Image (cartoon, grey):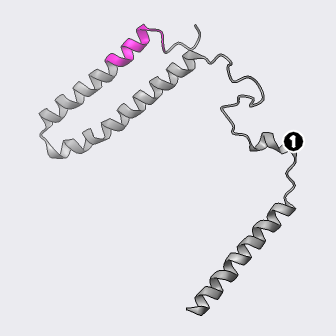
Amino acid sequence: MLLIMYNSIIIILICNILMFISIILSKKTFSDREKSSPFECGFDPKSSARIPFSLHFFLITMIFLIFDVEIALMFPIINLFKLTNFIIWTNISIFFICILLIGLYHEWNQNMLNWTK
C-alpha cells in the first residue's frame, strides 16, 4: 500500500513539473491570440459579427441535408427486399422515390436550386 502511495506521489509530481516546464517554455505572445480564437467558416474574428449572411447558401445547405437524410433512409429499403415479397417492396420503393421527386420538383419551382438570383 505504501508503495502505491509513493508511486502516485511521484507520478503527480512529474506531471506537475512537466506542465510547469511547458508553461515556462511556451512562446505565446499577444499576437498569437488570433490563432487561438475559434475559426468560423472563413469569417474574420476581429470584424463585426453582424455581417449579412447569404440566405440562399443556407437554403442550399438545408436541401443537401434533407436529401442526404432521405438517401440514408433508402438503405433499409434494400434490406426490406429480403423480408417481403416483390410487390410490397416495389410499392414502398416507388412511394418513397415519388416523395423525393415531388420534393425536388417543388424546390425546382421555387428556384431554390438556382445559385444566381
Question: What segment carries the magenta color?
Answer: 102-112
Q: Describe the element under mark 1 as helix, strand or loop.
A: helix
Q: Nearer the viewer, residue 10 or 26?
A: 10
Up the image or down, 74 lies above or below 103; here it is below
Q: Which residue is mark 1?
A: 31
Q: Is residue 35 left or right of residue 6?
A: right
Q: Nearer the viewer, residue 91 or 54?
A: 54
Q: Is residue 71 left or right of residue 93?
A: right
Residue sitting at x 59%, y 88%: 4
Rendered location of residue 79, percent (x, y): 24, 45
Q: Residues within 10 Å of mark 1 (few under 14, many from 20)?
A: few
Q: How many marks?
A: 1
Residue sitting at x 83%, y 44%: 32
Residue sitting at x 71%, y 28%: 43
Q: Nearer the viewer, residue 20 or 87?
A: 20
Q: Is 66 inside the magenta-drawn segment?
A: no
